[in-house]
Amino acid sequence: MRSNLDKLNGQKTANVTQDGKPAPADKPSSGADSVSLSNLEQKVKEQASFDRAKVESIKEAIRSGNYPLDPRRIAENFVSLERMIEG
């Protein structure tokens, strides 16, 4: 079975022109895009709050071996992740 990496290694990328220069879509973005990303970053930082006490409680439960794990759910999520990776 060939991995996705093996498949990709056998393909040429469409992002490069024949002379090896970057395709137009690969050129650096404009200043407007940069400002937009800066604004988005600021909004994320403002909204990135979490319950520190809850996080510490979960950490302690994991350390003490009392955090409930569902092996079936973990396995299902791994399968889902593998399907996403395989495309």
Image (cartoon, rainbow, N blue to C red):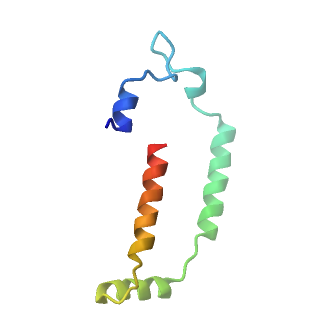
Query: Could you tell me residue 9's position as x and y percent?
Result: 36, 27
**Residue 1: where, in percent of width, then height?**
31, 37
Give whichever of 65, 47 is nearer the camera.
Answer: 65
Q: Is residue 45 left or right of residue 5?
A: right
In this picture, is 35 found above or below 55? above
Q: Is residue 20 above or below residue 11?
A: above
What residue lies at 47% left-to-right and 50% top-to-bottom? 83
Q: Nearer the viewer, residue 64 or 29?
A: 64
Tell me: residue 50, above or below residue 15.
Answer: below
Q: Quadrant of residue 57?
A: bottom left
Query: Depth check: 34 or 55 in front?
Result: 55
Q: Is residue 73 above or below residue 9?
A: below
Residue 50: quadrant of the picture: bottom right
Q: How many marks?
A: 0
Give coordinates of residue 71: x percent, y percent: 38, 74
Between 27 and 80, which is closer to the camera in this rendering?
80
- Give the side of residue 64 with respect to residue 14, left or right: left
Q: Residue at x 40, y 85 (%)?
A: 68
Q: Residue at x 54, y 83 (%)?
A: 51
Question: Residue 66: where, in percent of width, then height?
Answer: 35, 90
